[in-house]
Image (cartoon, rainbow, N blue to C red):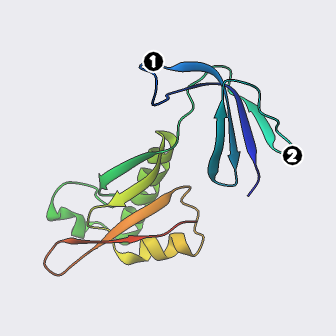
């Protein structure tokens, strides 16, 4: 995974009550390596000037129903193709809203997690839960 240096970023830092501007953030692979108000040597990193926009790690949605076309048992009446399209749309919209991690709270079967693990294009990481026979979610995690 390539390295990326984000320059001129506004960031939220633990020690400050307000947004801090003009920071550099170096990401090595998929890990935030350093954050500095001084320029960071980018080496072979791709440099992206974010022009003062807010830069933050991805959000986590801790309770989602990605296959839910409605909040009722009527979902069983929908064909699998419509449910798959709804789930793909939900995942895409979640990513565009800044969510990079989702915990499926029940309803999605394990095949969605398997497809993601096999590299299906979902553009997000899914932390799913398969429904137990008693209706409680079992968590599993995967990453692309």
Q: Position of residue 86 (x, y in %)?
A: 39, 56
Vertical position of residue 115 compared to residue 19: above or below: below
Determine which quarter of the picture holds residue 110: bottom left
Left or right, 115 with reference to 102: right
Residue 109, which numbered label? Answer: none
Rendered location of residue 30, percent (x, y): 64, 54
- The kind of secondary structure element at disc 2 is loop
Residue displayed at 13% across by 78% down: 134
Instruction: Judge by depth and name the residue closer to the eye, 95 or 101.
Output: 101
In the picture of the structure, the residue carrying the numbered disc 2 is: 44
User: Residue at left 40%, top 55%?
Assistant: 102
Of the 4 image quadrants, the one containing the C terminus is: bottom right
| Residue furthest front in the image | 15
**Residue beneath label 1, please?**
18
- Given residues 72 and 56, the one toward you in this image is 56
Q: Residues within 10 Å of mark 2 (few under 14, many from 20)?
A: few
């Amino acid at each position: 995974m390539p390295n990326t240096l984000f320059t001129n970023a506004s960031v939220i830092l633990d020690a400050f009550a307000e947004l801090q501007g003009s920071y550099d953030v170096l990401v090595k692979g998929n890990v935030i390596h350093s954050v500095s108000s001084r320029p960071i040597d980018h080496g072979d990193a791709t440099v992206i000037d974010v022009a003062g926009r807010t830069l933050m790690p991805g959000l986590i949605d801790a309770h989602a129903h990605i296959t839910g076309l409605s909040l009722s048992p009527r979902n069983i009446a929908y064909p699998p193709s419509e449910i798959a399209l709804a789930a793909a749309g939900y995942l895409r919209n979640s990513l565009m809203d800044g969510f990079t991690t989702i915990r499926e709270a029940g309803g999605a079967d394990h095949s969605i997690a398997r497809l993601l693990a096999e590299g299906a294009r979902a553009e997000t990481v899914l932390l799913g839960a398969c429904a137990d026979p008693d209706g409680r979610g079992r968590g599993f995690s995967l990453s692309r």
